[in-house]
Image (cartoon, helix red, strand yellow):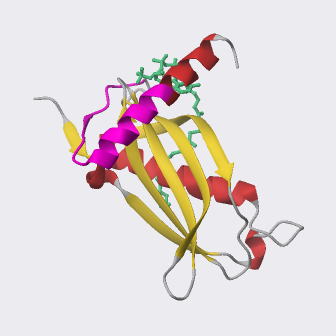
């Protein structure tokens, strides 16, 4: 039987409070800390989708839209947008949530995660069931990003 899962089956949402040890010298959330949080979310999404170990192959379109500051509540949401053979694309969106519940986007990133077998070799990832128009649109956009990645890899970037 072909293994397949929905986008909603692996969706991950995490929350962090920005503390003094997360700040850079300019008093903003340090980009490296945020990237660690994003990688953990992307890893967990991919693990939930594949039910296997996973590895980060690449990160692209990592866009810092706005900064975050001490005491900000940072919400990170990750979901699978595309599945290839052994790899999958995970989109990770980051927001700062205010006391009234409004979420302001501060970052978006696309991770390519690879499913691994027990020998740490790439293994086939379960297919993705697309249920909404938004998921189908994401899939089409992700296909274009994948083509660009393959071209970049071939050209040695
Ligand atoms: C929430 C609370 C937190 C709590 C906590 C939770 C924990 C939640 C779990 C965390 C889980 C850990 C998640 C982080 C895990 C790391 O941080 S991993 C550390 C950093 N990453 C690495 O060390 C990876 C090193 N690279 C490699 O091992 C190899 O290059 C790879 C990625 C396995 C690929 O090997 P390869 O020989 O190129 O294999 P190949 O068959 O050619 O490619 C396999 C697939 O990768 C794709 N690919 C290969 N290279 C690239 C590239 N540069 N760009 C894009 N795609 C690529 C190929 O297109 C192919 O895709 P498919 O066509 O099969 O779909």
Q: Residue furthest right?
A: 25
Q: Quadrant of the N terminus?
A: top left
Q: Is residue 101 left or right of residue 10?
A: right
Q: Where residue 125 sits: x, y (%)? A: 31, 31
Residue at image x 45%, y 43%? 90
Which residue is depicted at the point 28% across and 46% down?
133
Question: Is residue 68 something one can see in this rendering?
Answer: yes
Q: Is residue 151 above or below residue 141?
A: above
The answer to whether residue 114 shows anywhere in this view is no
**Residue 86, located in which quarter of the rendered image?**
top left
Quadrant in which residue 70 is drawn: bottom right
Which stretch is magenta?
122-144
**Residue 84, percent across and down?**
37, 26
Query: Among all residues in the image, which is located at the extreme left?
Result: 1
Q: Please tell me which residue lies in front, 127 or 107.
A: 107
Q: Is residue 67 above or below residue 85?
A: below
Which residue is outermost to the bottom? 99
User: Seen in the image, is 121 located left or right of residue 4?
Assistant: right
Image x and y of residue 63, in percent: 66, 49
The stretch drawn in magenta includes residue 137: yes
- What residue is drawn where x is 44% and y is 34%? 141
- x, y percent for residue 8: 28, 54
Against 28, is 98 above or below? below
């Amino acid at each position: 039987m072909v293994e397949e899962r929905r986008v909603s089956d692996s969706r991950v949402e995490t929350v962090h409070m920005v503390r003094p040890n997360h700040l850079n010298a300019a008093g903003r959330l340090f980009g490296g800390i945020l990237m660690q949080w994003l990688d953990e979310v992307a890893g967990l999404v991919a693990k939930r989708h594949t039910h296997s170990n996973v590895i980060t192959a690449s990160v692209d379109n990592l866009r810092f839209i706005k900064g975050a500051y001490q005491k900000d509540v940072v919400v990170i949401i990750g979901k699978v947008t595309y599945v290839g053979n052994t790899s999958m694309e995970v989109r990770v969106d980051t927001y700062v949530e205010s006391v009234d519940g409004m979420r302001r986007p501060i970052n978006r990133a696309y991770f390519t995660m690879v499913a691994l077998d027990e020998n740490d070799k790439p293994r086939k990832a379960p297919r993705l069931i697309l249920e909404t128009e938004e998921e189908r649109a994401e899939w089409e956009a992700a296909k274009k990003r994948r083509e660009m990645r393959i071209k970049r890899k071939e050209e040695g970037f």
